[in-house]
Amino acid sequence: MSMVRLTGLQEMIDGISRERNLPKTAVEAALREALLKGYERYRRTQSLDVRNIFDETYFDNFDVELDTEEEGFRVLATKSIVEEVADPDHEIALSDVQEVAAEAQLGDTVILDVTPDRDDFGRMAAIQTKQVLAQKLRDQQRKLIQEEFQELESTVLQGRILRFERQSVIVAVTSGYSQPEVEAELPKREQLPNDTYRANGTIKVYLKKVCEGSQRGPQLLVSRADAGLVVYLFANEVPEIEDDIVRIVAVAREANPPSRHVGPRTKIAVDTVERDVDPVGACIGARGSRIQVVVNELRGEKIDVIRWSPDPATYIANALSPARVVEVRLMNPEERQAHVLVGDDQLSLAIGKEGQNVRLAARLTGWKIDIRDVAKYDRDEEDAKMASYLAEREAALALAAAEAADDFAEEEPETDDFADEDAEFSPGEIDPSAAADDETDDEFDGDDLEDDDLEDDQEHAPLDSAADADDDDQDADDDQDSDDQDPDDLTENDSTDEDFDSDDPDSEALDQEAN
């Protein structure tokens, strides 16, 4: 078998492996793919006069074999044995194979050496191989980084500042001890306004995302403004959090305020499972020793530690700390709207500078908080406004439900499930085929319907009594009602009566119209 010599092949593989921190198997796989692309380029240059002869899958049966001991490579092709050869790159004649292997049969496959001479390989094929090799090595590096840091996403890493690119900071992070460093990007929006970055300086960063794909630039996106960094710093400084005695319930952080006149601020809600432990005091520490370490790491960011409470009113009052709250009124618990009453001297403190304090309290609690002056607050007027709002909302919901029900009834296809073509009955008479379907599908008769509805709602009594009346009396009543009612309307009401709930006002109106 022929071979193209590559002097120093083993040394080249070892050097690339050390330089790019890749395993040797990954380097060898990338080299095989690159050499196969070079062979494709060689074959294409040999067939320039024939257009569109090679498609994307034409070289799928070709492979490259590396020989590190003899320092070279071979190109192998897998061909099928046929009677007459139509494509020499994919097929071989049975007679040619039987000269070497007499037991060969039609349909079998053989592997042949199709390695070209080194002189024929060409300069363009060598350039193609070099370019593909560089690309494959980058792809292998990205894949290795994804596998290495995928499990470390949403954790805090120690980073070393390498350089600055535009407004981003390139940081070198590592996944563990004695592991190689990997570049990560710290964009402008994830930086703290009080941070000062210097080359080779060390900072703690939060691994926010591991990017996938083959885009340029670092694959790791780190942050200094994420709330997860605050949680990690407290968990690192407070042993009670690590022991699950104190737990962090919620965090609201504004690391980059919308105005430069407002500094970064964080509110954190904590709770404990033991009555003898003060969760707020455990996070603050003796004379503020524990929280001061967190503040120093965040470059002087203001942090409010408050006590979480299952009572929304108490929780909202604590979240507005340091302001003193007089009363918290939960105006609309369904939409989580609350009015907070404070004194005149506490009004600006509760709102905060440019609304930062109440904005963070709303994020922390998940309630819409409205700060009001207790001296100017009119309870009756606010209650009337809220009652009017709730009534309008209920009316709007009822109207929307009625419109949706009407649209559904109009779009429903007409069937013969509730009417018999041969049956003749008056408009006020109950359809016997519909009653039979009701007994089969819903498994209840007219008497059960009457008993259940009499217990829940008396409005169905006329309909049930009409169903149980004598046939002669029913025919007489139906003849009298047929003059005032439209048969089409009644049939539509009977067919759609089961689709409406008994408490729906539209359903009650249809029942009254039917009776």
Image: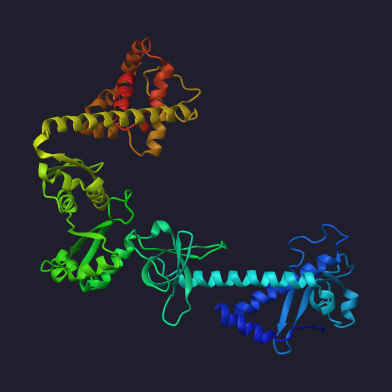
Res 173 quadrant in image:
bottom left
Q: Considering depth in this image, is 141 or 218 the residue closer to the camera?
A: 218
Q: Considering depth in this image, is 114 or 284 the residue closer to the camera?
A: 284
- Above or below, 285 relative to 514: below
How many marks the image carries: the answer is: 0
Q: What is the quadrant of the N terminus in the image?
A: bottom right
Q: Is residue 387 visible?
A: yes
Q: What is the quadrant of the C terminus in the image?
A: top left
Q: Is residue 155 visible?
A: no
Res 111 quadrant in image:
bottom right
In the rendering, at what x and y percent does residue 347 appear?
A: 15, 44
In the rendering, at what x and y percent does residue 32 appear?
A: 69, 76
In the rendering, at what x and y percent does residue 489 appear?
A: 41, 19
Q: Residue at x 37, y 32 (%)?
A: 499
Query: Furthest residue to the bottom?
Result: 69
Q: Residue at x 23, y 48 (%)?
A: 353
Q: Residue at x 69, y 84 (%)?
A: 9
- Above or below, 478 relative to 355: above
- Above or below, 321 relative to 297: above
Q: Considering depth in this image, is 381 or 167 the residue closer to the camera?
A: 167
- Above or below, 345 relative to 215: above
- Colouring convention used in this rendered image of the protein: rainbow
